[in-house]
Amino acid sequence: MAEIIITKDNFENEVMKSDKPVLIDFWATWCGPCRMLAPIVEEIAKEYDGKIKVGKVNVDDEPELAGAFRVASIPTVVIMKNGKIANQAIGYRPKEALVKLLEL
């Protein structure tokens, strides 16, 4: 499954009501580390298709969501399970570290 663009309009359905864990990547187009992380997040979306959802939040387009998660630095990756934050990492992380956050 491809990554989902998360907005304030679809957040409730895609994240809060998800029956699967959701990896949310908070990013921006001008952020170098975010661009380095993007292919890793895409790989995880493909490899864990059916087990998790992967969403992307552009902090410039969705400042309310970024604020709700207190995102002060990007990239920030948040793992949501059953509508609650289960794990979180700030800054670039290698794939193994992101997979470990999922604790599948």
Image: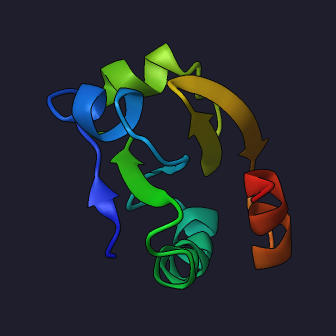
Q: Is residue 30 above or below residue 58?
A: below
What x and y, as percent, mark residue 39?
Answer: 53, 83
Q: Quadrant of the C terminus?
A: bottom right
Applied colour scheme: rainbow
What x and y, as percent, mark residue 59?
Answer: 39, 39
Kindly identify the residue that appears in the image at 29 percent across and 44 percent down: 6
Q: Is residue 92 visible?
A: yes
Q: Is residue 74 visible?
A: no
Q: Is residue 37 above or below residue 76?
A: below
Kindly identify the residue that appears in the image at 37 percent across and 46 percent down: 57
- For the image, the number of numbered tags is 0
Given residues 48 and 73, the one toward you in this image is 48
The picture quadrant where one finds residue 80 is: top right
Given residues 63 and 2, the one toward you in this image is 2
The picture quadrant where one finds residue 86 is: top right
Kindly identify the residue that appears in the image at 85 percent across and 65 percent down: 97
Q: Quadrant of the N terminus?
A: bottom left
Kindly identify the residue that appears in the image at 54 percent across and 28 percent down: 82
Q: Is residue 89 left or right of residue 46?
A: right
What x and y, as percent, mark residue 102?
Answer: 73, 55
What x and y, as percent, mark residue 4?
Answer: 29, 59
